Image (spheres, rainbow, N blue to C red):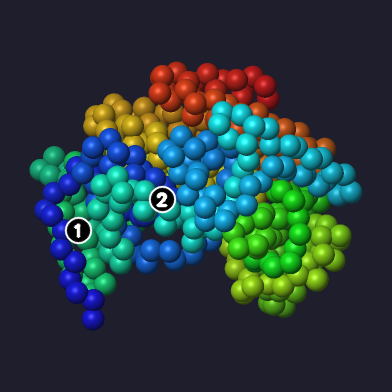
Amino acid sequence: MQAQISFPARYDAIVVGARVAGAATAMLLARAGVRVLVVDRARLGDDALSTHALMRGAVLQLHRWGLLPALEAAGTPPIRSATFHYAEEEIQVAIKPRDGIDALYAPRRTVLDPLLVRAAAAAGAHVVHGVSAVGLVRDARGRVSGAVLADGDGSLTRVEAPIVIGADGIRSPIARMTGAPVERAGRSATAVIYGHLVGLALDGYHWYYRPGVGAGAIPTNDGRTCLFVALPPARFLHELRGGIEPLYRRVLAEADPELARAVAHARLDAKLRSFPGTPGFLRRAWGPGWALVGDAGYFKDPLTAHGITDALRDAELLARAAVTGTDAALAAYQAVRDEVSLGLFEVTERIASFAWDLDQAKRDHQLIARHMAGEAEMLLALDRDPIEAASRAAGAGAMSA
């Protein structure tokens, strides 16, 4: 039986969720001198559904935070090119050295999440696994002023804090308890099946597109390649009855027959995992005494592989606002998040719809590249004026569309 976990009665902030978004937010808060408690219902190092890929903005964040050496020391291979396959056409894009980084990375979540948790703890955050938030504490005005926490035995503890941050995923209990509304709802979704393969020798990221299907090959830790296929949810549900592996291999052969032949000589190191698809959304990201970050506040379809990058970006935006400690700062956090997110959200919607031909897919990927360049510019300018920098970056992306 698990012993009851005890907490001090009060912190400056409570973060619910110790994955990428929550651990990064807690680390930055602790580095700023905030007394922060982080809880997560899962165990440290548990895996998570993820395609692992970090885009330039995410790698830039890890570099700025001094965490890239640890990621490299964990054996995460550097990615120095991305190849887009449009049926038989291939377009290779080199990852150019810039702003202190010369490669991208795609760490397993069993590597990245603990790395961020250790960094948060090293900065002074109190991190506890096996604990859930089951309620919110509110003051006489109705403002959130803490959380009710439950350990593995169901023992309850009330902990107070001026802000409770939900970093607890798509189906965020904190979002539900605060009543955070969805302010922008997507219409499109893709179903994804993925596995980790041994013996699939590919250099760099590879993205595959044919009408009605997509795929991605992403080198990750321990000599594995994360290989996913994407398809419309209706087809996924209909054909899943014939077995997940036959469906996986069938869609893979449609996306790229040559890749499917190479996979036939590789070995799956564990069972396939799947995600049936859910439309993206932007929820209201803050309210009196609370805020949301990561998938709890903003989720978009995984086909563009930008979720971890979003999470790390928004962790810094929220941490800066929470350190300021005013509702105006939290409102500005949401305004900046929305401004730098909407362009990528809309183009991801189009790609996830599968209602494109290959020429349209190419144009949309060029647009994504411009949005990501603006995002990186905003991150570099954070120490000057984050709101103004975000506005300039988002405006540049809109003009270039």
x, y percentage for residue 40?
A: 33, 60
User: In which image quadrant can residue 273 be found?
Assistant: bottom right
Residue name at image x 49 percent, y 26 percent? 380
Count the labels in the image.
2
For marks 2 and 1, give the one nearer the viewer.
Answer: 2
- Which residue in the protein does label 2 denote? 116
Q: Residue furthest bottom?
A: 1
Who is closer to the viewer here, 370 or 219? 219
Q: Residue at x 81, y 47 (%)?
A: 85
**Residue appearing at x 22%, y 61% in the figure:** 149
Q: Are marks 2 and 1 in contact (CB under 8 Å)?
A: no
What type is the residue that disc 2 sits on?
Answer: Leu
Image coordinates for residue 283, horizontal then vertical, percent: 42, 43
Q: Which residue is mark 1?
A: 148
The kind of residue tagged 1 is Val
Identify the image quadrant of the N terminus.
bottom left
Please identify the quarter of the rendering in which residue 42 is found.
bottom left
